[in-house]
Amino acid sequence: MDDIFVARLMSSDLRTVTPDTLVEEAAGTMLEHGIGSVIVVDDDGGLAGILTSTDFVRIVAERRPKDETPVSEYMTTDVVTATAQDVVTDVADAMLDHGVHHIPIVSDEDGVIGIVTTTDIAAYVSQTEAPSPA
């Protein structure tokens, strides 16, 4: 896995929202597409943050009116990112080090170009690693 780049595993079919999107709408997008996060982008399409299913635990726990609360209230802005040329093991290590399950893939030219999740890495490992002996 040391020579496999993130570009091979990342999903480029991103769902994005803006900081002003209401959390209820963001949740609907996540449910509709069966995803665990949405990328928050600014007016220029640049990475502003990420909102994950884990954030919704806090949203529900705080019991604020969901239809009036913007994503910016809960999104993570100190986002751990990677590039398409990063090695998968480095990205997996970053996930462990930072305790995250979603890492946006960014490009200097194009901004956010994809996302890689722990599920993507686990699926790759399960397909490429030989099963352990019985």
Image (cartoon, helix red, strand yellow):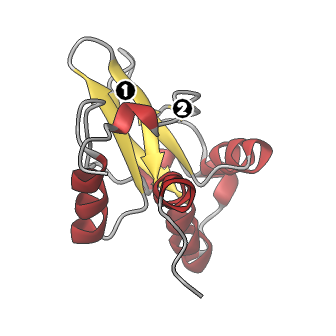
Tally the numbered discs. Answer: 2
Q: Residue at x 51, y 79 (%)?
A: 132
Tell me where residue 92 appears, x and y as whole percent: 31, 59
Q: Secondary structure at mark 1?
A: strand
Q: Secondary structure at mark 2?
A: strand
Q: Name above or below for residue 59 compared with residue 116.
A: below
Judging depth in this view, the residue of 17 and 80 nearest the camera is 80
Q: Residue at x 79, y 43 (%)?
A: 32
Query: Furthest-bottom residue in view?
Result: 134
The three-letter code of the residue at mark 1 reads: Val
Marked residue nearer the N-terminal end (2 or 1): 2
- Tell me the number on the disc at residue 4: none
- Dot in front, 2 or 1: 1
Q: Residue at x 28, y 49 (%)?
A: 79
Residue at the spot of label 1: 112
Q: Name above or below for residue 14 compared with residue 130.
A: above
- Tell me the number on the disc at residue 16: 2
**In which quadrant is the C terminus drawn?**
bottom right
Apparent side of residue 35 relative to residue 103 in the rendered image (left or right):
right
Query: Furthest-front residue in view?
Result: 133
